[in-house]
Amino acid sequence: MKLLHDEALWEAVETRDRTYEGIFCFGVRTTGIFCRPGCPSPLPKRENVVFAFWPSILLERGYRPCLRCRPEGTHRTDDSVKTVVSLCRFIEESESVPAMSELAARSGLSMSAMSRLFQEALGVTPREYADARRRERFRYALRNGADVLEATYGAGYGSTSRVYEGTHVHLGMTPNVYRNGGRGKRITYTVAMTPLGYLLVAATDRGVSSVKLGDVPDILLEELREEFASAELQEGGEKLFEWTSRLVDYLGGHLPWPELPYDVRATAFQRQVWEHVRRIPAGATERYSEIARQLDRPQATRAVARACATNPVALVVPCHRVVPKGKGLAGYRWGLERKRKLLQLEGKDMNDP
């Protein structure tokens, strides 16, 4: 079965995989245009791309069909994914979250078989997928000027209390703050010198939001400002200093590794990978492929590697403990020499396979 989670769909866009045509379309926020996965147009940046299994979803959001690939008429589905795509389209077009029994009835399968099929393709349950689509509709409405009440009912929430319970975790801020582009959201930060260079740590009151390593503190600060362009950045903070001190001590050779809380936006799959990585003991490593198998996604090795590469909280999610198959350490956003030193710091024998 073809994989249908966001990482697989993005890979299909990157490689212009025409075998996915008729299964999904993708929209580009910066141009307002949507395309087939095999479109020959220039490749957009990943952060600007949204996916949908039905062209009408993107048309309703104001996207225009690409004049080169003509995506609006693509309705074909391969037999191997027909059931899952049909359920996804039904969920996307539903005003509220459908019941599991309703989805099972539409698929002609038992609820357990339907859920298993869904998870195999997307890596999430039907409920998680429906909740994610509902949050997406809510965010879209807020970004386009709707007030919280209007966005609440338009997205299928029964009350604003459900919104604040269900979306705060994923937005990393309240709906009203999100509606204003994060304006007024306070993020504290600090920069410290360590044996591995400068360490920048930024956090909300709920957890660490960014950890960066580098040689030039001004560059780290500029990256932070770009990352949180609409938030209020403020230096210092008692809780932040405590978390930073623990990381500095750790980099100075004082184990154990500090298990700090983190507060970042992530897909369901990214969070699965990061939580798994946090369970790898200090001094041990795992292969990208091993993690994919343990997450019951044996074909998702590249997606695991991508989740590690996009981890915004280095050390807090210790992706340096994930290595490729064979010799070498592969890439590390903060430099291979730092990755090597981190593993040696934790007692990893670099001659081990």
Image: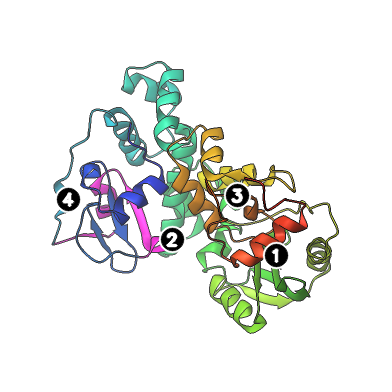
Q: Secondary structure at mark 4?
A: helix
Horizontal and vertical percent for residue 120?
A: 42, 30
> Which label was assigned to residue 72?
4
Residue 133 counted in the magenta span = no
4 or 2: tag closer to the N-terminus:
4
Query: Disc 4 residue type?
Result: Glu
Alpha carbon distance from label 4 to label 2: 27 Å
> Which label was assigned to residue 322?
3
3 or 4: tag closer to the N-terminus:
4
Residue at 45%, 41% in the rendered image: 300
**Residue 32 in view here:** yes
3 or 1: tag closer to the N-terminus:
1
The residue where tag 2 is placed is 146
Q: Which residues are magenta?
A: 45-67
Q: How would you rate the neighbour count of disc 4 (Cα within 10 Å): few for under 14, some for 14-19, many for 20 or more? A: some
Quarter of image, res 276: top right
Horizontal and vertical percent for residue 142?
A: 46, 60
Given residues 323 and 1, the one toward you in this image is 323
In the rendered structure, the answer to whether residue 100 lies left or right of residue 17 reads right
> Which label was assigned to residue 203?
1
Given residues 344 and 225, the one toward you in this image is 344
